[in-house]
Image (spheres, rainbow, N blue to C red):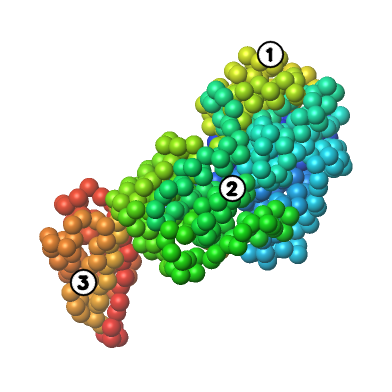
């Protein structure tokens, strides 16, 4: 029997994303021949993937099992949990379950690809019992940095799995509900087979802190700042949005929202009943009419993204917003691992212009939405699982989380990676196999490509080795009608060393050396030109540039 065949009554868990990484979450539960999917998110690409902004899990395995996929249940509205739905749902075509707020965010994404009236979205509330046979799913309200985040109690004939989602224990979250400890405790008392749990902050010894404390910290920090104040944070942090609006109000500054994703979150929040009683919010195009010391800008781009508002402002590329000496920028967010170089470059650009830069390293301007060790210990005390399954972390987070769970007297902990088939029961939990668990890269429009495919490999070659475009014009006799045109880009110092002239001469010699009859074969001409260019390049630099050779013919052959 295949490891993924659960018709014998086994219960298995298969992560296709989010195990061994932070982001791109996709977890499958299999039982009685059926599958339940929890979350379908994205992660952001780095400079190693030229032209690519986002990545998502490759759903090939579950696509092959889609007839037995009972539903996709979304835990909350963050991009790394629902950002791939509008890209990948056509491959799955299953019912989708979401809270009202998450559904509001999702519908906007579906509208971008014409699927808003196609995807069946079912709204659930905390405490509902979703009958998704052979699974019964109970959403449990938890606190996170976005409203309506849920843990999921997944009940089966084998036992109950508690899927934590992203969470923290914050008794003053300001926006959204406090974690429902009583329901978590009730499931723990009934018996929980496994806790599949967030590992993001497992190295933090203390609690993550409260959103209310951030709001109290921002006001005295910014009270006496001259000029414009700009704050950048994650667009989805609705509580932080409200905190910044209240700080602007207390400072008698107008709140100017800069960035489309912030406006989308604002619209979705108001639709779901949040952020409705804020002071008036100003569009960026109107900021120039206000005194600089009466403006507080709330901007996207807290991770230094080139297309984020803060990145464009720092480069002087924003249409409506500028910053200058004496202004202040607050990065009210965590530095996500892997973004350090891009973000520090942004900090330095601002500092060189005389702008004060404040980060979480300097002052208390951010709290995480994920649990530290004290919160993890409390969660394990509430749920009392027989098995800990750390996810939502890199390999080092997962390994440390497993060790920590065992120190809390959890009987067993299992570390998993994307593609592992973990048998949860009956019997002793163990990894019994693997399934394909790759990534897909979004290449604009509707194109999804393999990050390790030929398209990306060619882009890397262009990025690191440059390109040379060669055009040769042959007359009716097969002779050169003009000097070959050679245009190198990013290959060598082409401006002052005559490199292109040398290559043009080499191309001319190669064609003149060809037997006349072969000059009428475009393939032979291109081959000769390529050999000549490669030899000329090797004589100058150790590169293998991409070659694009064009052969043009004038007149008719004699």
Q: Which residue is drawn at 27% across and 61% down?
A: 489
Q: Where is residue 285 in the image (x, y as percent from the top left)?
A: 49, 69
Q: Residue at x 63, y 64 (%)?
A: 112
Q: Which quadrant holds the N terminus?
A: top right
**Residue 430 can be seen in this image:** yes
Asked if residue 109 lies left or right of residue 152, the reply is: left
Q: Please, is residue 446 above or below residue 418 in the view?
A: below
Q: Mark 2 or mark 3, which is nearer to you?
A: 2
**Mark 1 element type:** loop
**Residue 8 can be seen in this image:** no
| Residue at the spot of label 2 | 243
Could you tell which of marks 3 and 1 lies nearer the N-terminus? 1
Could you tell which of marks 1 and 2 lies nearer the N-terminus? 2
Label pair 1/2, CB-CB below 8 angstroms: no
Label pair 2/3, CB-CB below 8 angstroms: no
Q: Mark 3 or mark 1, which is nearer to you?
A: 1
Q: Which residue is drawn at 44% across and 68% down?
A: 288
Label pair 3/1, CB-CB below 8 angstroms: no
Q: Position of residue 176 (x, y in %)?
A: 70, 44
Q: Residues within 10 Å of mark 3 (few under 14, many from 20)?
A: many
**Mark 3 element type:** loop
Q: Which of 415 and 533 is in front in this view?
A: 415
Could you tell which of marks 2 and 3 lies nearer the N-terminus? 2
Q: Where is residue 201 in the image (x, y as percent from the top left)?
A: 56, 30
Q: Which quadrant holds the C terminus?
A: bottom left
| Residue at the spot of label 1 | 409
Asked if residue 257 lies left or right of residue 553, the reply is: right
Q: Distance between the residues labelled 2 and 3?
A: 64 Å
């Amino acid at each position: 029997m295949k490891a993924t065949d659960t018709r014998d009554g086994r219960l298995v868990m298969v992560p296709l994303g989010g195990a061994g990484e932070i982001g791109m979450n996709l977890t499958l539960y299999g039982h009685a021949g059926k599958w339940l999917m929890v979350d379908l998110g994205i992660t952001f690409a780095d400079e190693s993937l030229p032209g690519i902004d986002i990545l998502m899990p490759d759903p090939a395995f579950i696509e092959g099992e889609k007839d037995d996929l009972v539903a996709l249940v979304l835990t909350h509205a963050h991009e790394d949990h629902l950002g791939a739905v509008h890209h990948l749902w056509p491959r799955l075509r299953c019912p989708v379950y979401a809270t009202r707020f998450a559904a509001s965010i999702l519908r906007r994404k579906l509208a971008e690809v014409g699927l808003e009236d196609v995807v069946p979205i079912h709204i659930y509330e905390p405490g509902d019992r979703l009958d998704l046979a052979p699974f019964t799913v109970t959403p449990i309200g938890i606190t996170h940095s976005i409203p309506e985040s849920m843990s999921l109690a997944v009940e089966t004939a084998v036992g109950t799995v508690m899927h934590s989602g992203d969470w923290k224990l914050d008794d003053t979250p300001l926006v959204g509900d406090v974690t429902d400890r009583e329901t978590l405790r009730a499931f723990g008392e009934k018996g929980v087979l496994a806790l599949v749990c967030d590992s993001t902050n497992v190295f933090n010894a203390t609690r993550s802190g409260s959103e209310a404390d951030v709001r109290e910290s921002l006001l005295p920090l910014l009270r006496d700042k001259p000029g414009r104040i700009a704050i950048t944070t994650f667009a989805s942090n609705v509580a932080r949005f409200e905190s910044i609006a209240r700080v602007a109000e207390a400072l008698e500054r107008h709140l100017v929202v800069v960035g489309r994703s912030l406006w989308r979150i604002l619209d979705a929040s108001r639709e779901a009943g949040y952020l409705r009683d804020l002071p008036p919010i100003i569009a960026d195009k109107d900021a120039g009419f206000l005194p600089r010391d009466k403006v507080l800008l709330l901007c996207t781009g807290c991770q230094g993204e080139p297309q984020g508002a803060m990145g464009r402002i720092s480069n002087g590329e924003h249409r409506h917003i500028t910053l200058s000496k004496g202004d202040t920028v607050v990065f009210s967010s965590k530095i996500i691992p892997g973004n350090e170089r891009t973000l520090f470059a942004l900090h330095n650009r601002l500092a060189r212009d005389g702008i004060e830069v404040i980060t979480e390293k300097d002052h208390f301007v951010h709290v995480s939405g994920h649990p530290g060790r004290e919160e993890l210990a409390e969660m394990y005390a509430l749920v009392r699982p027989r098995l800990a399954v750390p996810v939502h972390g890199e390999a080092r987070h997962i390994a440390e989380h497993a060790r920590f769970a065992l120190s809390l007297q959890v009987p067993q902990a299992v570390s998993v990676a994307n593609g592992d088939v973990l048998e949860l029961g009956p019997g002793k939990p163990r990894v019994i196999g693997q399934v394909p668990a790759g990534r897909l890269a979004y290449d604009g429009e509707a194109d999804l490509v393999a990050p390790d495919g030929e398209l990306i490999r060619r882009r890397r070659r262009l990025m690191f080795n440059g390109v040379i475009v060669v055009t040769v014009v042959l007359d009716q006799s097969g002779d050169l009608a003009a000097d070959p045109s050679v245009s190198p880009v990013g290959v060598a110092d082409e401006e002052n060393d005559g490199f292109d002239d040398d290559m043009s001469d080499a191309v001319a010699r190669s064609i003149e050396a060809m037997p006349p009859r072969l000059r009428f074969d475009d393939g032979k001409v291109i081959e000769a030109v390529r050999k000549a260019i490669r030899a000329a390049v090797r004589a100058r630099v150790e590169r293998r540039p991409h070659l694009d050779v064009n052969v043009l013919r004038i007149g008719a052959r004699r």
